Image: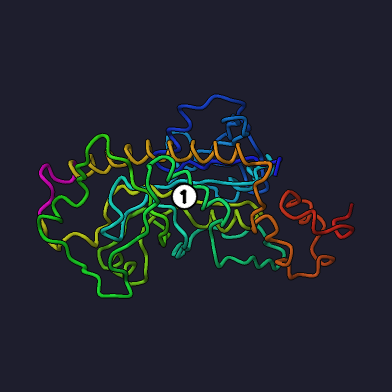
Amino acid sequence: MSDVKLGIIGGTGLGEELASGSAGPRHEVETPFGRPSDAIVEVQWDGLPLLLLSRHGAGHVLGPSRVPYRANIFALKKLGCTHIIASGAVGSLREEFRPRDLVVPDQVIDRTFARERTFFEQAAVHIEFAEPFCPVLRPMLLEAARMETGESARGAGGETAAGQPDTHATVEEARSANNVERPADEAFKVHDRGCYVCMEGPAFSTRAESLMHRLWGGDLIGMTCMPEAKLAREAEMAYALVALVTDYDCWRSLPGAASPAGGKQELLREIIGNLKAATANAMRLVRRVASLIAQRRESLRPSPAHGALELAVWSDKNRIPREEVQRLSPLWIRYFGEASGK
């Protein structure tokens, strides 16, 4: 695929890092769904064109429910984006996913309810979404992880929700749940799978909810993967996610357990420190995978996502209003032919 153009959607941490360290043409894109979170910056890494977008906008002013997901994905499509690597901060629902680790998820549970979930408001469009992340991009991310860390990306071992998970930490563990002491030169860990539970937010889970998410089989809890991944599929763009683990979700705390020394402020400082470390690791991984894509773009096989709409439009195309076909033309015009009015 010689026309590969990679979009990078930076979430909490990585979005700010990309915005501060990137210089290039800034695209202010208008879409049928309003303007995206921020200007999209076009750069090149190793000769590969990249489109950089900060999900939460300049200054991180957009909460997860206020992110214009449809405008973001539509704008990237309009600029010729073919593949997306997104990032996002998450809490861990499993002991083995430690703060500062990275995870390349393979599944999603969608618990959002206040967001627009589709581009197609005047047609019945049913995309296939059993595997929400691209089977071309995910292996490349894991290969890049092996190159960066010198070891295989780690599977999520340990007890799963199908067994009898221990839902309580010791008091000492609860006090230091998010305080990760690691040697400065220790390679960061990348896990090769994980189920991301996407909640509405902006408040974090109650402890009961956190325990429920574990029983469902969730490994990570975040607020931004959906409907972003689903919209990317509707726009026929390959999509993969790098999750940045900042803390253990509240399932790991004992009811009434003492706060860390220094109280809530100390806990927040630890989480912010974990985010900074995970962001640095994610930047290394994203740059490495961009380099791999640049080297292989001529032979890169198409993603199944690139034909996602081929059989997904169930409406009679001649009955879909022409204005609607044209309004969404970057997404689906190639499937209409004469029905598009052209």
Which residue is at the far bottom?
163
Q: Is residue 218 above or below residue 97?
A: below
Q: Which residue is mark 1?
A: 142
Image coords of residue 203 (percent x, y): 33, 55
User: Does the magenta-highlighted stretch encompass residue 23?
Assistant: no
SS for dot 1: helix
Looking at the image, which is closer to me, 150 or 179?
Answer: 150
The residues colored magenta run 258-265
Looking at the image, which is closer to me, 273 or 267?
Answer: 273
Image coords of residue 153 (percent x, y): 40, 51
Q: Say which amino acid is labelled 1.
A: Leu
The residue carrying pointer 1 sits among few (fewer than 14), some (14 to 19) or many (20 or more) residues within 10 Å by Cα, namely many
Q: How many marks?
A: 1
Which residue is at the far top?
23
Q: Is residue 94 left or right of residue 120?
A: left
Q: Can residue 199 be seen here?
A: no
Image coords of residue 229 (percent x, y): 54, 55
Residue 276: which quarter of the image? top left
Q: Is residue 133 left or right of residue 202?
A: right
The secondary structure making up most of the magenta span is loop
- Placement of the N terminus among the 4 image quadrants: top right
Residue 198: which quarter of the image? bottom left
Q: Is residue 124 above or below residue 134?
A: below
Residue located at (45% from left, 65% from top) = 109
Image coords of residue 72 (percent x, y): 58, 45
Q: How is the image coloured?
A: rainbow
Q: Is residue 30 left or right of residue 155?
A: right
Q: Is residue 113 left or right of residue 230?
A: left
Residue located at (55% from left, 50% from top) = 137
Q: Can residue 226 be seen here?
A: yes
Residue located at (56% from left, 57% from top) = 135
Residue located at (61% from left, 46% from top) = 83
